[in-house]
Amino acid sequence: MLFSYLYCMKNAPIGIFDSGIGGLTIGYAIKEKLPNENIIYFGDTKHLPYGEKSSKAIQSFSKKIVRFLIAKNCKAIVIACNSASSVAFNVVEKEAENLSLFNVIDPVVEEVVKVCADYDIGVIGTKATIQSNIYEHKIKELCNSSKVSSLATPLLAPMIEEGFISEKISHTVITNYLSNKKLANIDLLILACTHYPLIHQEIKEYYNGRVNVIDSANIVAEYIYKQLNKHNLLNNSKTTQHHFYVSNYTKSFEQSAKFFFKEDVKLEEVNLF
C-alpha cells in the first residue's frame, strides 16, 4: 500500500499559479529541468496584476487557487508570483500543509547570499513586493553586512502582459527605471517579478556587463528539482500532460501562453471567485 501511495504521489502533477503570463517563465523552466513532470498552471487573469492589489486581496485570491490545485491532486504547488510569495505564502501554507509548497523568493535569496558580502544588491519588482520589503529582510537575515536597494517598477508587468518586449516603448520604460539613483551603484540586480525574465535580455543590454542580472526562473526550477528528489517525489513517467486554466479567458492570453511556454496551449476558464 505504501509503494502504491508513493507511486501515485510521484505521478501527481505540480501546480503553478500566477496572476498572468509571468509564471509561465517558471513553468517553462520547471518543464525543462523536470521533463517527466505533469504541470497544472493557473493564471488569475481576472485579477492581474497582483502587484497593484492589497495584501488582503492577494491572500484571498491565493487561498482559492491553492484549494483548486489541491482538488486537482497536486503533489507540490509553486507560487510563481513574487507579489503572492511576498504577502500570501504564510497564509496558504495552512491550506497546503500536506504538500510541498514553494515560493519564488527563498531559492533566489539563498543563491544571492552566497556572494552577499561582495556585492551591493538591487531589487526591482511590483509595488506589493517592494513595499513588503521581503527581499531586504530575508537577505539581511542571512547576511547582515549586505546592502540592498529596492525599487518598485509597476509599469513593467502590464507592459509585458501587453506584449511590449524589445520595442521602443519597453526600452524607454526600462531605461527610465534602471537609471534611478537608487540603483546607481549596484553590482547585482534581482528581477523580483516572474514577468521580468521576458525582458532579461533588454535589462542585460542596458547594463552592458556592469551588473550581474539574476533571473529567478532557473534558480527556482533547480531548487524544486532538488527538493522533490530529496523527498523521493520525482516523476519517472515518460508521458506527461500539462493543463492550463485561467480565471478569465482571452484569445490573446492563450497565444501569449503558447509563445512563452513553447508548446501548444489550450486554456480552460474556471470560475473560482
Image (spheres, rainbow, N blue to C red):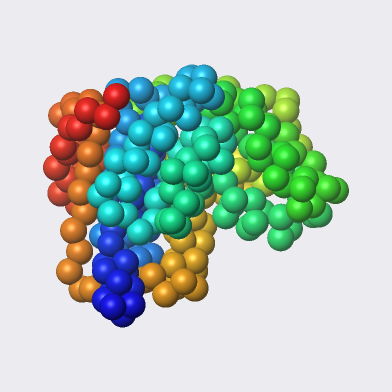
Residue in the picture at 63% in, 43% down: 189
Q: Quadrant of residue 135?
A: top right
Percent position of residue 53, x then y: 48, 20
Q: Position of residue 207 (x, y in %)?
A: 60, 41
Between residues 141 and 75, which one lies in front from this camera angle? Answer: 75
Which sits in the foreground, 103 or 89? 89
Q: Report the residue that reaches farthest toward the right.
A: 145
Q: Could you tell whether 230 is left or right of 236 in the image?
A: right
User: Closer to the camera, 181 or 70?
Assistant: 70
Q: Residue at x 22, y 39 (%)?
A: 245
Instruction: Give coordinates of residue 203: x percent, y percent.
Output: 53, 39
Quadrant of the image occupied by residue 90: top right
Task: State the residue in front, 218 or 74.
Answer: 74
Q: Is residue 252 visible?
A: no
Total number of numbered discs in the rendering: 0
Whether residue 76 is visible, yes or no, is: yes
Image quadrant in which the C terminus is located: top left
Judged left or right of residue 135, residue 221 is left
Q: Is residue 241 above or below residue 11?
A: above
Q: Residue at x 28, y 54 (%)?
A: 73
Residue 273 to residue 246: above or below = above
